[in-house]
C-alpha cells in the first residue's frame, strides 16, 4: 500500500497498526478516536496543527525500515 496525504486514518491503521505509534510520536494522540477514522492524513494533520509532509515522511520512513 502506498500511503499519501489523501489516505484515511482508518486505511493506514488497518494496513499497519504500527503507524499509530508514528502518529502519536508526531503529536497526534487521537488515533483511536472514531471520528478520525474517515479523515485523511492531511485533514487530521490540519486539525492538530501538524505539517502533513513531515508526518507522511515519518510514516514512510517507518514503513521502509520494516521492509528491510
Image (spheres, helix red, strand yellow):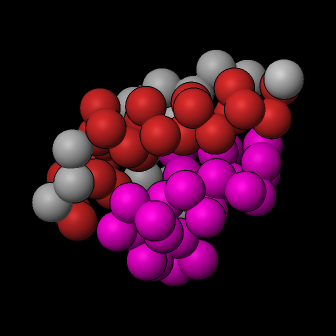
For the C terminus, the image quarter is top right
Please name the residue shown 59% across and 77% down the image: 32
Please name the residue shown 38% across and 43% down the image: 55
Task: Tell me: residue 4, above or below residue 13.
Answer: above
Task: Tell me: residue 62, above or below residue 16.
Answer: above
State whether residue 35 appears in this view: no
State whether residue 50 appears in this view: yes
Residue 7 as seen in the image, left or right of residue 67 = left
Please name the residue shown 42% across and 53% down the image: 39
The number of numbered badges drawn on the structure is 0
Can you tell which quarter of the image residue 53 is in? top left
| x and y, in percent, of residue 29 in the image | 43, 77
Residue 46 as seen in the image, left or right of residue 2 = left
Residue 15 as seen in the image, left or right of residue 25 = right
| x and y, in percent, of residue 31 in the image | 53, 70
For the N terminus, the image quarter is top right
Does the magenta-highlighted stretch encompass residue 28?
A: yes
Does the magenta-highlighted stretch encompass residue 56?
A: no
- Magenta-colored span: 8-35
34 or 53, nearer to the observer: 53
40 or 50, nearer to the observer: 50
| x and y, in percent, of residue 37 in the image | 55, 61
Task: Tell me: residue 3, above or below residue 52.
Answer: above
Please name the residue shown 22% across and 65% down the image: 48
Residue found at the far left of this picture: 49
Amino acid at each position: 500500500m502506498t500511503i499519501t496525504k489523501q489516505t484515511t486514518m482508518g486505511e493506514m491503521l488497518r494496513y499497519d497498526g504500527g503507524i499509530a505509534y508514528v502518529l502519536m510520536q508526531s503529536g497526534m494522540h487521537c488515533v483511536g478516536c472514531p471520528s478520525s477514522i474517515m479523515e485523511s492524513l492531511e485533514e487530521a494533520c490540519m486539525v492538530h496543527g501538524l505539517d502533513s509532509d513531515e508526518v507522511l515522511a515519518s510514516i514512510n520512513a517507518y514503513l521502509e525500515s520494516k521492509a528491510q
